[in-house]
C-alpha cells in the first residue's frame, strides 16, 4: 500500500508530498494570529475548532504582548496606508483594552491556502459569511477591518512572519535553518 503522506521529492527547501490523484502539494507552515478582537469576543476556542477542520498540526503556540516595533514590522507592507496608525494600535490591543494576541504556527500540506480559505477575505463584509472573518469581523467607524485573525498569505510571507514572531526554540521541529549563537549578559526573568 503506498503511503500518501510519504515525501516523494525534495526541490530546494520545499518538500512535496504525493496526494490523491497524483497532485503535488507542498508541506508548508503558516502563521495564524488570533487578534485582540478575537480574544475579547471569546472566539479562541471557536477559531481553533474551525482551523482543526484542516487536519493541519500546530507546531508552535503562545500568547504575545505585541510591541509597537513588532506591530510595525508585521504590517510594514501597509506603512503608507492612511489606516496604518490605527492598524498598529489594533494589533497591539490598544483598541480592545487587552494587550494580548495568540500566535500559532500550523503545518501541513497546502497549509497556507487551507487556512486562508477558512479565515476568509480581508474585508469582513466581502468575506464568505461562513468564514471566520465573514462571521465575526467588522469594519470600524474609522474604516479599519477588525477581522479577528491573521493568516499568512504566501510561503515567503509565512517564513518572514514565523521568524519575526517565533524563536527556533519555541517551535517543535526544524523548519528553517538555524545557527548557534552564544549570548552573554542576557538579562531575563526567572522564577524567584
Ligand atoms: P490580510 O490580513 O488578509 O493578509 P493585508 O492586506 O495583509 O490583509 O492587511 C493586513 C490587515 O490590515 C488586514 O487583516 C486588516 O486588518 C487591515 N486592512 C487591510 N486592508 C485594509 C483596508 O483597505 N481598510 C482597512 N483595513 C485594512
Ligand atoms: Mg497579509
Image: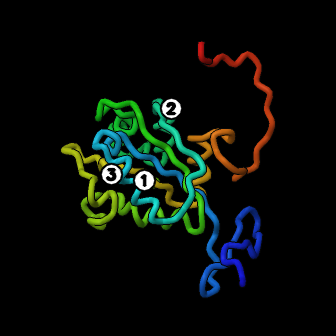
Residue name at image x 42 percent, y 66 percent: 117
Check residue 69 in the rendering and tell me which mark sits there, or answer none. 2
Q: In screen coordinates, is 104 left or right of 1?
A: left
Q: Secondary structure at mark 3?
A: loop
For this orientation, the residue located farthest to the left is: 141
Mark 1 / mark 2, whichever is N-terminal:
1
Give above or below for 136 relative to 109: above
Percent x, y for residue 173? 70, 50
Percent x, y for residue 154? 54, 61
Which residue in the protein does label 3 denote?
A: 147
Residue name at image x 35 percent, y 41 percent: 39
Q: Of tags 1 and 3, which is closer to the observer? A: 1
In this rendered view, identify the residue nearer to me: 1 or 131.
Answer: 1
Residue name at image x 28 percent, y 43 percent: 41
Give above or below for 106 relative to 15: above
In this rendered view, identify the residue nearer to me: 173 or 26.
Answer: 173
* Location of residue 157 by image quarter: bottom right
Amino acid at each position: 500500500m503506498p503511503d500518501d503522506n510519504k515525501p516523494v521529492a525534495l526541490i530546494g527547501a520545499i518538500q512535496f508530498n504525493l496526494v490523491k490523484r497524483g497532485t503535488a502539494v507542498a508541506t508548508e507552515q503558516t502563521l495564524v494570529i488570533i487578534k485582540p478582537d478575537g480574544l475579547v469576543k471569546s472566539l479562541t476556542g471557536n477559531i481553533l475548532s474551525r482551523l482543526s477542520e484542516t487536519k493541519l498540526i500546530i507546531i508552535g503556540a503562545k500568547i504575545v504582548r505585541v510591541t509597537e516595533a513588532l506591530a510595525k514590522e508585521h504590517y510594514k507592507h501597509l506603512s503608507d496606508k492612511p489606516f496604518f496608525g490605527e492598524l498598529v494600535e489594533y494589533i497591539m490591543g490598544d483598541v480592545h483594552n487587552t494587550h494580548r494576541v495568540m500566535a500559532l504556527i500550523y503545518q501541513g500540506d497546502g497549509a497556507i491556502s487551507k487556512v486562508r480559505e477558512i479565515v476568509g477575505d480581508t474585508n469582513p463584509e466581502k468575506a464568505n459569511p461562513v468564514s471566520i472573518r465573514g462571521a465575526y469581523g467588522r469594519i470600524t467607524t474609522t474604516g479599519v477591518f477588525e477581522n479577528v485573525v491573521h493568516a499568512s498569505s504566501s510561503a515567503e510571507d509565512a517564513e518572514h512572519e514565523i521568524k519575526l514572531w517565533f524563536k527556533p526554540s519555541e517551535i517543535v521541529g526544524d523548519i528553517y535553518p538555524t545557527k548557534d549563537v552564544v549570548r552573554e549578559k542576557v538579562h531575563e526573568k526567572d522564577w524567584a
